[in-house]
Image (cartoon, rainbow, N blue to C red):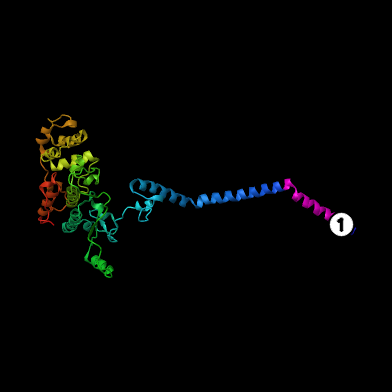
Amino acid sequence: MDNDSSSNSKLAEKKLKHTQSSPSNKKQRRHHNQHHTKGKKLQQDNIGSITDAAEIIRQKQKKKASVVSSSTIPAKKNNKLSSGIQPHQQQQLPALVLEHAGQKAQWFCHGISAQKGVNADTSYLTETEMKYYLCHLLIALDGLHSAGIIHRDVKPRNCLINRFDSMKEEKDEQEQYQLHPLPPPPLILVDLGLADFYLPGKDYNVRVASRHYKSPELLIGFGYYDYAIDLWSVGCMLAGLLFRREPFFRGKDNEDQLGKIVSVLGTRDFLPYCRKCNVRLSSKSRAAIGKYCSASLSSSSSSSSEEAPTSSLLNNDMSRRKPWLSFLSSDTPIPSKEALDLLDKLLVYDHEQVRDLTSLSFI
């Protein structure tokens, strides 16, 4: 029995070796190993396609930036500059980092009474505060203009002020910043995204500035403007502050905005200014101006306002500038003569008539 069992075991071992060494079995094992390897590689590829997605995006951005850079920047072999900087790194634009405006900075306008805990009686800026912050705004603009830069987007949201509602709050604020050399600035002019260098005789884009603070030259499509468009925006801000009507010129579109300006400043100086700029008004602008003119005309001028004749624009109440005091409401304090005088100098069609604002007593 022992001999039979040992012989059977030897036969089984021989059969196993024979099956393992047969070509068909080797082929099956090879197919199994290949299938297992392919499955493992497929898993790795799927995981890599997810985990390496950010790297793929970065590579695409670098490739795109290098293509743009190579078309504008002379490069040596392997897209490397002589300084060793890659083209995609050269495309990074410089950033203008401004100082912090302060934790309690607000826009240069009224309307903070909507905030909780603020007394409505003290929410409006006083004329003294207007004078103080306006002086700082003009100083900021003078710094830009002296450097040959037009801001082209002056508005309350781009003028941040630090206002102290009481002496106690001012004292607390000073104690908070006693470890620092200087407290927050009273006013800081921000957002230079639309700013540009001024070059005399250059035709600039007129699609700049916010609509309610656009100057007349922008609204009539005159591209040869200068620093005066910033002063016009300051005048719009001052008018809104003095008469508590913000924005002061609230047009539905550019044509309606021009019509509202002409309805306040009159047409007597506007038409000569258009001729000086050699600009022909569009039909929509004429219709908008004619709409406001027809409101002040008598019933005899029942002609269509689409093409208001020039004679009707000059021979009615629209030809004269409206008095500023006509915009006062019952709860608005009367502005000083100095404030109204400054407003007369800022809100004009042709700023070549007024070049020096330093002699004004309001600021």
Front residue (pair 240, 52): 52
Q: Is residue 332 magenta?
A: no
Q: Residue at x 83, y 53 (%)?
A: 11
Q: Magenta part of the protein: which range?
A: 6-25
* Quadrant (top left, top right, bottom left, bottom right) of the N terminus: bottom right
Q: Residue at x 35, y 52 (%)?
A: 90
Above-or-below relation of 212 to 137: above
Image quadrant in which you'd find residue 262: top left
Q: Position of residue 135 (x, y in %)?
A: 17, 57
Q: Is residue 22 magenta?
A: yes
Front residue (pair 300, 275): 275
Is 272 positioned to the left or the right of 288 in the image? left
Front residue (pair 250, 99): 99
Secondary structure category for the residue under label 1: helix
Find disc 1 in the rendering and name its residue: 5
Type of residue at label 1?
Ser
Q: Residue furthest top?
A: 303
* Quadrant (top left, top right, bottom left, bottom right) of the C terminus: bottom left
Q: Position of residue 104 (x, y in %)?
A: 28, 60
Q: Residue furthest right?
A: 1
